[in-house]
Image (spheres, helix red, strand yellow):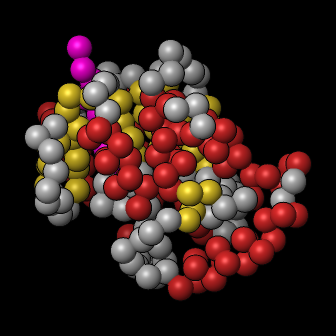
Amino acid sequence: MKKTAIILGATGLTGGILLQKLERDDRYGTIKLFSRSRIEGLSNKVEQHIGDVLQLEKFKNHFTADEVYCCIGTTTNKTPDKELYRKIDMGIPVTAAQLSSQNDIKKFLVISAMGADRDSRIFYNRTKGEMEQGVLKQEIRYTSILRPSLIDGDRDEQRTMEKIGIKIFKVLEPLFVGPLKKYKIIQAEEIAQAMINLANASSHAAVIITSNDIKQLAKKN
């Protein structure tokens, strides 16, 4: 029987690539999207549930699947209000994990960030760390938390500082050896493929996966 997958964040860079991959993947019969806006030109495999994802609990009856891919994330440039930022970056993934637990979804995969730490003084890192703890508290049988480094790819939006950071990292990358490998730039395509490979692995325990390991997992295609 073909599987059903849920994607949160399909309008973003990594989520968009993930959606394209799952549309082509014969293991999946249905792909459910939960978002504020409709994506045009998708295959008949895709069900789009449009509404306020900050109130994801309202979708509970439709939030059923074999696995959930959570690719939600914003930026301080797009969301300068810290309270709203937390509702997006922490609130949506944790609510999705709660719904997954309630609806007996066995696999939950979420993108976090390198440096995630609930005790960090840095707002971004602290928010991601709190998100991870909130997800893990749901005790979903197969939970994967991916912590990528700086993500590269063709974005629709302009992120000036991120582009500068990527250029600097590309110059420094030859120095990233041994324990520093996890700081190398990672492609959004690698993250998407790694998530699919993890979801289709025979089994895995709750785990946090660093950027260099994400790269290795992406190669097992």
- Residue at image point 34% right, 55% down: 16
Residue 150 in sight in this render: yes
Q: Which quadrant of the view contains residue 169?
A: bottom right
From the image, give the main secondary structure of the stretch colored magenta.
Answer: strand
Q: Is residue 7 magenta?
A: yes
- Residue at image point 53% right, 39% down: 194
Position of 147 with respect to 178 (left or right) is left
| Camera-side residue of 97 and 24 | 24
Position of 133 with respect to 115 (left or right) is left
- Residue at image point 45% right, 29% down: 199
186 over 159 or under it: above or below: above
List x then y, in percent, for residue 29: 20, 28
- Residue at image point 66% right, 69% down: 122
Q: Which quadrant of the view contains residue 30?
A: top left
List x then y, in percent, for residue 158: 44, 82
| Camera-side residue of 148 and 45 | 45
Q: Which quadrant of the view contains residue 127?
A: bottom right
Magenta residues span 1-9
Position of 50 with respect to 112 (left or right) is left
List x then y, in percent, for residue 85: 43, 69
Q: Which residue is outermost to the left?
A: 44
